[in-house]
Image: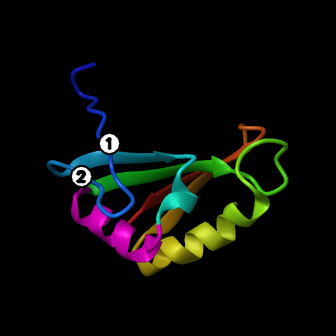
Amino acid sequence: LTQVVAVQASATTPNLPEPVDVVLVVDTYHHIPNRPAYFRDIRKSMKPSGRLAIVDFRKGAPSGPPEEFRFTPEQITAELKQAGFSLQTQHDFLPRQLFLIYTF
């Protein structure tokens, strides 16, 4: 797909080369040390109509990282609100993971 470009980010920088339409973060939310600042940086690299999708393990799911590294949708939303995002959609079709979509 020519319209999809995968970018490997680090825990301190998103490494986005130009304004993007969608940012997808899968199973790595807990690895980011200063999430509000990190997602403020991501927001700067998104188009005005951009969306941020967070997929991460639910609390209580049978697999994934230890419970202390899992977040509720409310915890993620509170952190992302500090970065200027608001929850647009929450999908519940993944049995072990949250699927949250944010806009700004």
Instruction: Name the residue located 57 percent from the left edge and 47 percent from the top edge.
Output: 27
- Give the extent of the magenta segment: 33-47
Structural crowding at the residue carrying mark 2, measured as other residues with C-alpha within 10 Å and reported as few (<14), some (14–19) or many (≥20):
few
Which element is circle 2 on?
Answer: loop
Residue 34 in the image, given as x and y percentages of width and height: 44, 74
Magenta: predominant secondary structure element? helix
Specify whether 97 is left or right of 104. Answer: right
Which quarter of the figure is the N terminus placed in?
top left
Front-lying residue, 41 or 66: 66
Query: Which residue is denoted by mark 1 in the rendering?
Result: 8
Q: Is residue 97 left or right of residue 42?
A: right
Mark 1 lies on a secondary structure that is: loop
Q: Residue furthest top?
A: 1
Quarter occupied by the C terminus: bottom left
Q: Is residue 68 visible?
A: yes
* Above or below 25: residue 48: below
Whether 37 is drawn above or below 7: the answer is: below
Residue 63 spot, x, y in % from top left: 78, 41
Q: Label 1 is placed on what type of residue?
A: Gln
Which image quarter: residue 49? bottom left
Q: Residues within 10 Å of mark 1 (few under 14, many from 20)?
A: few
Residue at the disc numbered 2: 15
> Which amino acid type corresponds to the residue marked 2 in the rendered image?
Asn
